Amino acid sequence: MADAQYYPDDWKEYVSALKRQGKEPNQAWGIAASRYRVAGNFCGANFFQLSESITRGYDRAIQLLLAYSAFEAACSARGLKPEDRSVRSDTGSSKDARVKLLKAFGSLPDTDFPLKSSLSNATPTQKVEGFFRKEHSNLQPVAAAMRHLFAHGLWTPHGASVLSKSACQAIDLLAQSVLREVDQMLWEELSDATRSER
């Protein structure tokens, strides 16, 4: 995932392909790549007088927020809504993320961590619940719900179940899976851009 500067995979190839055609990357992909780079370079936040476990929880929440922002921008660049794009959970860290998310958050009641009812629309909420019932393996609704919980103030990392190292690892793997989907979308964009060169 990503080159040495944390741009999406294939970013340099994409820019080079467009330059060969006398074009510049479209602005939407520039935004997605910039957001991806910020997510890839995020190492953690510094807080005064917060415990290590609270800091760890916020670090993972911020990481996911940044990764999902890159994902939203990439979806926009591809002319999609985020909910129309499946975040694959069938390979590598995505598969690990599914297992860890189910373990860390699958049995938590909404009173402890309102993930399953965090989205106001019934369809995304049903998709989140379906993920935890093992009806599908799409990580996108879970990532959207966690991003929503954190960005809109309903999730402040507290309580052992949310701050555990395994829960933080699950969120980290979820963020990695979201960024891998950005890589995939850019690869698709590159394929579309180079089709005319063949």
Image (tube, rainbow, N blue to C red):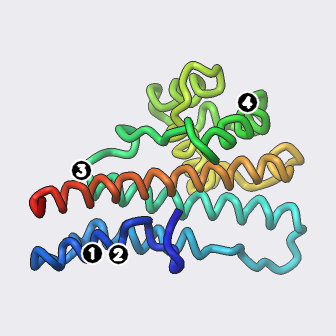
Query: What is the distance, in whole Å, between disc 2 and disc 1 at their CAs?
Result: 5 Å
Q: Quadrant of residue 117?
A: top right
Residue ID for mark 2: 12
Query: Do labels 4 and 3 touch, CB within 8 Å?
Result: no
Query: As shown in the figure, which amino acid type bears the numbered disc 4?
Result: Gly
Mark 3 or mark 1, whichever is nearer to me: 1
Task: Find numbered disc 3 in the image and state the secondary structure of the residue it sits on.
Answer: loop
Q: Position of residue 177 (x, y in %)?
A: 56, 50
- Which mark is on residue 15? 1
Tell which circle, 2 or 4, labels the residue nearer the N-terminal end. 2
Does 103 sit left or right of 153 as displayed?
right
Query: As shown in the figure, which amino acid type bears the numbered disc 3?
Result: Gly
Tell which circle, 4 or 1, labels the residue nearer the N-terminal end. 1
Tell which circle, 2 or 3, labels the residue nearer the N-terminal end. 2
Q: Could you classify mark 2 by the number of other residues whose Cα lies within 10 Å: few (under 14), some (14-19), or many (20 or more)?
A: few
Residue ID for mark 4: 106
Residue ID for mark 3: 79
Mark 2 or mark 4, whichever is nearer to me: 2
